[in-house]
Amino acid sequence: MKTNPVLLAMLLLPLVVATAPAAPGAGPRWLEWNAGLKQAAASHRPVLVDVYTDWCGWCKRMDRDVYARPEIRDLLAQRFVTVKLDAESSDPATYEGREQNGRALAARFRVSGYPTTVFLRENGEHMVNVPGYVPADRFILLLRYIGDGHLERGESFEAFVRDAAAAPKSR
């Protein structure tokens, strides 16, 4: 039996599109360090810093499977200033009045694995590190916990998750 190449292409196209990675730029609007901290101060929003390396497979997965999701992208755009920080970069960055680089900043925040998500207050003050890959459903809870001020009010993440699970779902 002879295969029609046009028919084969038409049959395979939906499969290729469905399994293709998210298009570049499908994630949040990432800023570099200095611009991000400046925007956070002006907008009075906390900063989410994605600390990564180019060789980190889990970092790439976080970009593809978590940051590219529309509900996460929207929540980040509404509540946070988003910064990408290459932990091996020698690009200049200013923090606490000192000129540093990506490597020094990662060390300053005691990042020891990748990815690590660092949250800063609007004034740049460190709030918390979240090490490792975080699945999207858990990451949304984390963004709401920090973005809605639960951490600042001293509520534990466990209590927040428990209360979120008990809350009636809106339709």
Image (cartoon, grey):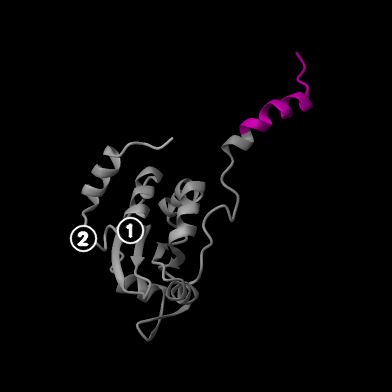
Q: Amino acid at mark 2?
A: Gly
| 10 in relation to 107, above or below | above
The quarter of the picture where residue 50 lies is: bottom left
Q: Position of residue 72 (x, y in %)?
A: 46, 50
The reply to whether the magenta stretch includes residue 4 is yes
In terms of secondary structure, where does tag 1 sit?
helix
Q: Which residues are magenta?
A: 1-15
User: Looking at the figure, which quarter contains the N terminus?
Assistant: top right
Mark 2 lies on residue: 154
Mark 1 or mark 2: name the one nearer the start of the chain.
1
| Helix, strand or loop for the magenta stretch, by majority | helix
The quarter of the picture where residue 10 lies is: top right
Q: Nearer the viewer, residue 128 or 51?
A: 128
Q: Which circle marks residue 159 in the picture?
A: none
- Tell me if mark 1 has few (under 14), some (14-19) or many (20+) residues whose alpha carbon lies within 10 angstroms of its own: many
Q: Nearer the viewer, residue 103 or 49?
A: 49
Mark 1 lies on residue: 146
